[in-house]
Amino acid sequence: MTHLSPTSGPDSPEEGLCSERHAANPAAAGPLAVTEAQRMAEFLNVLADPTRLRLISLLAAEEYCVCDLASNLGMTDSAISHQLRALRAARLVTYRKVGRQVFYQLHDHHVLELYQTVREHLNEESA
Amino acid sequence: MTHLSPTSGPDSPEEGLCSERHAANPAAAGPLAVTEAQRMAEFLNVLADPTRLRLISLLAAEEYCVCDLASNLGMTDSAISHQLRALRAARLVTYRKVGRQVFYQLHDHHVLELYQTVREHLNEESA
DNA sequence: CAAATACATGAACACATGCTCATGTATTTG
DNA sequence: CAAATACATGAGCATGTGTTCATGTATTTG
């Protein structure tokens, strides 16, 4: 600690006591508890991969089967299948089976919005 | 490929030709090129860490010096300093030196908005 | 039924990442 | 100036991650 600003307690942010904090920003919802930070990091980690981002960018336009995704990205079916597994686990995509093919699509507009938000933010701040 | 849908070329998405694609979503801007996907993934990777997310959640409210951030998260100054270095490199925070202390704050409202967007999206989809 | 196709999955390896520990650099204090 | 403080940083290590390779499972085709 600074030994100058005796603010609240040293730990456990989830224990509340937003007493004198005033939360300069109302929408901030206070400091993140460890567990929530972990869940948030896990989710972001799914997005934070070039291959998975490219998959999402393709699925943002239309439905694709695994082998088409693979050939579009110039990667093996296996590699793509592994990544789709991760996207499925994170509930970012859904799939439907047609014969021996499996067509993937984005789970909902939520995913698309988040993806686009990040992409736009990155294109703007090329300062 | 599917051998059924002869869509465009197999690779190099940046070569354009948004000919018959129509880009279902105007803001989607088509499939991600490899380089852009990498830059996007690098940026998201900075956010995708529990410690850095908690740092951001603290800085969302007010300015903090390193040792206060450390004691708030119950971690060593060194660990926090390393993470702040990553946040600095990603231009997510700025700092100002006062004596021997260094006060960090979020770089701009952009960062706060992105953080809050992700946090809200995660709280909603607790299906 | 046998072969081929489309996809899934486990193991393994190369590589990246976050922390600790030791050390270095300003800045302040005695 | 010497000691202490606040922070930065490099090395090292444990752990996690993405791909390849081999193999397994449905489904279709001959």
Image (cartoon, coloured by chain):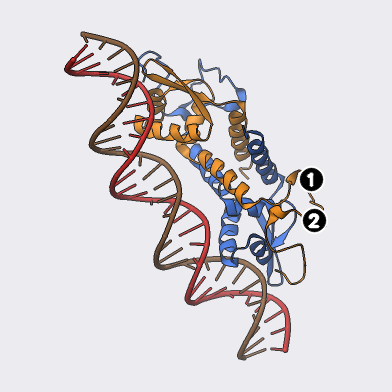
Chain colours: A orange, B blue, C red, D brown
- Quarter holding the N terminus of chain B is top left
Residue D1 or A89: which is nearer the viewer?
Answer: A89
Which chain contains the residue that carries disc 1?
A: A
Q: Please say if A107 is above or below B44.
A: above
The answer to whether residue C3 is left or right of residue A58 is left
Q: Give the camera-side residue of A123 and A117.
A: A117
Residue closer to the observer: B83 or B127: B127
Tell me, yes or no, if residue A76 can be seen here. Answer: no
Residue at point 56%, 20% (across, down) = B23
Quadrant hosting residue B25: top right
The label shown at residue A21 is 2
Question: Which residue occupies 40% across, 23% down?
Answer: A68
Tags 2 and 1 in contact by the CB under 8 Å rule? Answer: no
Q: Are marks 2 and 1 on the same chain?
A: yes
Q: Quadrant of the C terminus of chain B?
A: top right
Residue B95: where, in percent of width, then height? 68, 60
Q: Position of residue B71 (x, y in %)?
A: 66, 65
For residue A26, the mark is: 1
Q: How many residues crowd mark 2 within 10 Å: few (<14), some (14–19), many (20+)?
A: few
Say how many tags the image has. Answer: 2
Label 2: element kind:
loop
Q: Tell me the amino acid under the disc marked 1.
A: Pro
Chain bearing tag 2 is A
In terms of image quadrants, where is residue A83?
A: top left
Q: CA distance from mark 2 to mark 1?
A: 11 Å
Q: Amino acid at mark 2?
A: Arg
Residue A97: give x, y in percent of width and height.
Answer: 43, 18
Q: Which element is circle 1 on? A: helix
